[in-house]
Image (tube, rainbow, N blue to C red):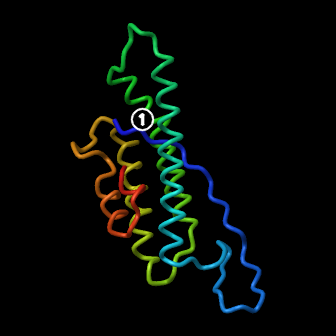
Amino acid sequence: MAALAAATCLVVALGCGGGDDESTTAAGPELTHAQVVKQGDAICSQAGAKASRELSAAIKDLPRSQGLDKATEERLVLTINVPAIEGMAADLDALNPPAADQEELQAVVDGFKDATAKIKAEPRAAPPAGPYGKASALAGSFGFQECSKF
């Protein structure tokens, strides 16, 4: 089971439209591709670290006699892993990429959202390569390093 975590919120300042050439939206100023990759990888790194801590704490709290059976693993996936990836996807979705990157970034976000929906519907049916394989591959193609590790 991949150790994943709840994503930390990325605060993006609202654009004030002060007459400069920088494009702004309610999500803030348009970012360059490099800025999207840097901020996105920070989101994914923080999500992974937090989830790892939460999973470690949850496993540590299990009675030694119980161990990590399938039911416990499923509960941890649904209460720690899935919310972490959903939060991470929401934070990635809040980034304001350049127009040329919008479709590709949306595919990454949708890939993580689709994977979490499938896990919720059938927690025990994760593919052998992991439930986030497709989304991770899309993230790697976009240029993300941390986001491609899920």
Please tell me in which quadrant of the rendered image residue 21 appears: bottom right
Q: Using residue 110 as the reference point, say whether residue 88 is left or right of it.
A: right
Q: Nearer the viewer, residue 129 or 82?
A: 129
User: Which quadrant is home to the N terminus?
Assistant: top left
Q: Residues within 10 Å of mark 1 (few under 14, many from 20)?
A: many
Identify the residue shown where x is 54% and y is 44%: 6
Please tell me in which quadrant of the rendered image residue 103 appears: bottom left
In the depicted structure, whether residue 149 falls above or below residue 137: above
The total of numbered circles placed on residues is 1
Q: Using residue 97 as the reference point, say whether residue 27 is left or right of it.
A: right
Identify the residue shown where x is 72% and y is 91%: 20
Residue at mark 1? 77
Residue most extreme to the top? 65
- Residue 120 in the image: state x and y as whole percent: 40, 42
Identify the residue shown where x is 43% and y is 29%: 75
Q: Nearer the viewer, residue 19 or 121?
A: 19
The amino acid on which the numbered mark 1 sits, given as a three-letter code, is Val
Q: Using residue 113 as the reference point, say whether residue 25 is left or right of it.
A: right
Identify the residue shown where x is 49% and y is 51%: 45
**Secondary structure type for disc 1:** helix
In the depicted structure, whether residue 107 falls above or below residue 116: below
In the depicted structure, whether residue 84 falls above or below residue 106: above
- Residue 148 in the image: state x and y as whole percent: 36, 57
Q: Using residue 45 as the reference point, say whether residue 65 is left or right of it.
A: left
- Residue 9 in the image: state x and y as whole percent: 62, 54
